């Protein structure tokens, strides 16, 4: 059920902002997977069992919801609206100009991902990562500062640039994330529709939609190295490794991680991210299509 091309004379659908904000708030139910993914990306020697044990040691069940309030909620409500509005508009224009559903989904997801990264996500993603990784301070016996104190300190020291540290990596991740998720999901929908003998544009059942989004969300994790780079750039962990660049960029961080941990290190945390990607794609593609149609 890819969105049909807009009829001539139809205006911009502003309601997609509200749809995106609401549906992306639903995706925060996957916060435990977000925490595990970040834990493993920031501590690349840890496997899944060790990461679970470490997160549990930071407050039991509550440890899996670190960074949820306020940053994940602020981020979800704002970035969801920006993503859904931008992606839907680009997808509609693309299909109106004869581009197929898969390519239109790819373009819409890429545009929406870039827009949400630069418009809303930089500072929220940075602060979520700080909240999840600053437990290292507690391990030394020092009581960690509150999230708001960390926010104020970063702003005082580095201004807007400090709060948005790693935003280029975030933009690259979101562009490839949502371009892949929406593109693969729409391609899977077309294949399922063809296999069932349905014409292009005919509605699919709920299970078929979920299956399409599952494929899209899982395949989109090919870009995990970008996520590991993003976490390293934004992490509150103070590394004493002399090989770590003093001024991190996307490319020198990628090189540093590869030299230290190899290919395996660049894909650390991909397992929980597959689960998270599936959940987010089901919410923001399949469920959102139903909500928009309703």
Image (cartoon, rainbow, N blue to C red):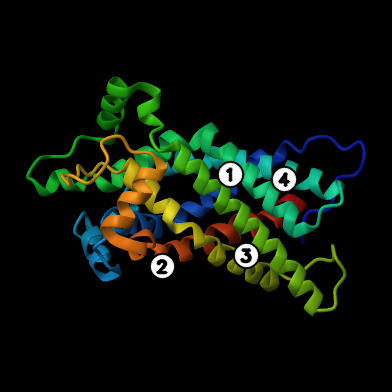
Residue 99 position within the rendered picture, expressed as x and y whole percent measured from the top left: 82, 53
Name which of mark 3 and mark 4 comes first in the sequence.
Answer: 4
Residue sitting at 27 percent across and 40 percent down? 245
Residue sitting at 26 percent across and 70 percent down? 49
Question: Can I make out residue 211 in this image?
Answer: yes
Q: Which residue, given by chain and number where applicable, does mark 2 sit on?
A: 271
Could you classify mark 1 by the number of other residues whose Cα lies within 10 Å: few (under 14), some (14-19), or many (20 or more)? Answer: many
Name which of mark 1 and mark 3 comes first in the sequence.
Answer: 1
Q: Which residue, given by chain and number where applicable, does mark 3 sit on?
A: 213
Q: Which residue, given by chain and number where applicable, does mark 1 sit on?
A: 113
Name which of mark 3 and mark 2 comes first in the sequence.
Answer: 3
Q: Which residue, given by chain and number where applicable, does mark 4 sit on?
A: 88
Name which of mark 4 and mark 2 comes first in the sequence.
Answer: 4
Gap between marks 1 and 3 measured at Cα: 17 Å
Q: Please, is residue 245 above or below residue 286 in the view?
A: above
Residue sitting at 54 percent across and 64 percent down? 278
* SS state under label 1: helix
Gap between marks 3 and 4 measured at Cα: 16 Å
* SS state under label 2: helix
* SS state under label 4: helix
Gap between marks 1 and 2 measured at Cα: 22 Å
Name which of mark 4 and mark 1 comes first in the sequence.
Answer: 4
Q: Residue furthest left?
A: 141
Kindly report which numbered mark, 4 or 2, lies closer to the viewer in this rendering.
2
């Amino acid at each position: 059920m890819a969105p049909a091309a807009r009829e001539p004379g139809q205006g911009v659908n502003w309601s997609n902002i509200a749809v995106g904000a609401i549906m992306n708030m639903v995706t925060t139910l996957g916060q435990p997977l977000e925490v595990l993914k970040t834990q493993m990306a920031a501590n690349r020697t840890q496997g899944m069992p060790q990461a679970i044990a470490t997160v549990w040691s930071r407050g039991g069940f509550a440890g899996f919801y670190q960074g949820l309030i306020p940053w994940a909620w602020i981020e979800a409500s704002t970035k969801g609206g920006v993503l859904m509005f931008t992606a839907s508009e680009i997808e509609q224009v693309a299909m109106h100009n004869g581009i197929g559903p898969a390519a239109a989904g790819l373009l819409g997801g890429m545009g929406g991902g870039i827009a949400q990264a630069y418009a809303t996500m930089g500072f929220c993603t940075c602060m979520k990562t700080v909240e999840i990784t600053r437990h290292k301070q507690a391990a030394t016996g020092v009581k960690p500062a509150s999230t708001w104190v960390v926010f104020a300190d970063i702003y005082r020291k580095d201004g807007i640039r400090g709060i948005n540290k790693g935003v280029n990596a975030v933009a690259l991740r979101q562009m490839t994330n949502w371009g892949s998720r929406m593109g693969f999901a729409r391609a899977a929908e077309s294949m399922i529709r063809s296999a069932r003998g349905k014409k292009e544009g005919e509605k699919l059942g709920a299970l078929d939609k979920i299956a399409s989004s599952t494929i899209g969300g899982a395949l989109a994790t090919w870009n995990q190295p970008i996520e590991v780079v993003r976490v390293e750039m934004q992490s509150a962990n103070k590394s004493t490794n002399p090989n770590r660049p003093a001024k991190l960029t996307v490319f020198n961080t990628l090189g540093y991680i590869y030299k230290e941990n190899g290919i395996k290190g660049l894909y650390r945390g991909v397992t929980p991210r597959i689960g998270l990607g599936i959940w987010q794609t089901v919410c923001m593609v399949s469920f959102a299509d139903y909500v928009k149609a309703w």
